[in-house]
Structures are given as structure tokens and as C-alpha cells.
Image: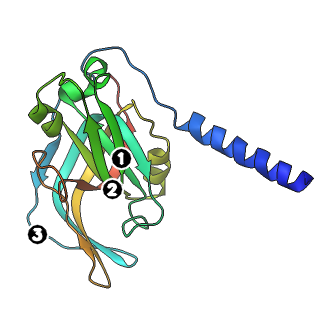
Amino acid sequence: MRVWLVVLLLLCGLGAYSWWHKRPVHAAAGVLAGDVPSQRDLGRGPQLARGHFSLEPRAKFAMTGRVLSREDYQLDDLAPIAPTDLALGWGRMSDSSVLDKIRISQSNRFYFWYTDHFPIPRHEIEDSSANMHMIPANDTVARELSEVRPGEVIHLEGFLVDVKRDDGWHWNTSLTREDTGAGGCEIVLVEDIHEASH
């Protein structure tokens, strides 16, 4: 009986630590990330080997955005290489006065938003936010990515990549911020990620 109590207390403690570690950051109203993501297309180039995966860089990519939500994955096809998705917003989708009127969630590698009354036009919500699958380029980036909290403003740099696995499974990145739905997410090989000053 005492062993189960210890286990229960440990689990509760780990849960509390995880929540505290990834608790949302609250910010005053105002645009916190004003610039649109920067992208330079590369065409088709050499592939990078990552265990059972190969990555084909499609564009050089950099952005500053507010973290609208984060979701960690362990069991799906992309989890071994991209364990975290970040939903990111820029422009008025980084403004608390707008985001307070939008409900945001993530599930099954998708990002969802809901609103009863549009605080900004629908197309602006769709064009100024995106769900991005994060592939850390090294252990340092993986640690920094694990520290990212919802509400933070971050800057990241790297590449948009297509992913292929040895067995033929593949996943292609979006190359535009104007698409939605299946295929509309960016797959980012992250070479640098840090909290942005604003």
C-alpha cells in the first residue's frame, strides 16, 4: 500500500512539474511579432540522412512568432524525428487582444482555432498562423525546444524540409503560409531557436 502511495505522489509531482515547466506566458495587448516569416526557396537539393529518415531541404526559413500552442508526440510516424509541433502566430495573431477571442488547440498533427466573433478577418487568422512540425538539428536545439512555452515569442532559423523514411513513407512540407488543412503544415529542420526580445 505504501509503495502505491509513493508512486502516486511521484506521478503527481511529475505532472505538476511538467505543467509548471510548460505553463503559458501571459502578455499585454499589442502585436509582439510583426514580421511575416522569411523564406528563400532552394529547389531540389541533396538529402540529409537521419537514421531511417532522409530530409530534403526545400527552402531556407526564419521567423519570429508567438507560440499559440504546443503539442508533443511519441507514437505517430513523425514522432521519432519531429517530437514537437508548435502553432505559431505573427502580425495580429501575436496580439493578446485578438488571441483572447480565439480558442486554439492541437491534435493529430493539426492546429485548430475557433471563435464566436471574428476579431480579425478569417483569412488573416489563416495567413498569419501555422502549425509547424519541429525537427531539432542537434541536442542543443532539442533542449531549447523542450523549454518553449505557449505565449512566448520565439525566433527560429533553419530549413523547410520534405521527409522520407526507408520504407517509402513520406511527408512533404508546405512552402506557403496561405494554405490550410492537410498538407498545410510546415516541417522545419530547426538549427537555432531562442526567445525573442520584443
Residue that label 3 marks: 44
Which quadrant would residue 97 be assigned to in this image?
top left
Q: Earlier in the sequence, mark 2 or mark 3?
A: 3
Question: Which of the image's four quarters has the N terminus?
Answer: bottom right
Q: Which residue is more in the foreground, 149 or 73?
A: 73
Residue at x 45%, y 26% (from the top left corner): 25
Position of residue 161 relative to residue 117, above or below, is below
Which quadrant would residue 166 be assigned to in this image?
bottom left
| Residue 174 x, y percent position in the rendering | 16, 56
| Residue 124 x, y percent position in the rendering | 12, 32
Position of residue 158 relative to residue 28, above or below, is below
Give the residue type at disc 2: Arg
Residue at x 23%, y 29% (from the top left corner): 93
Residue that label 1 marks: 106
Of helix, strand and loop, which one carries label 2? loop
| Residue 45 x, y percent position in the rendering | 14, 70
Relative to 183, is 104 on the left or the right? right
Q: Which residue is more in the foreground, 78 or 125?
A: 125
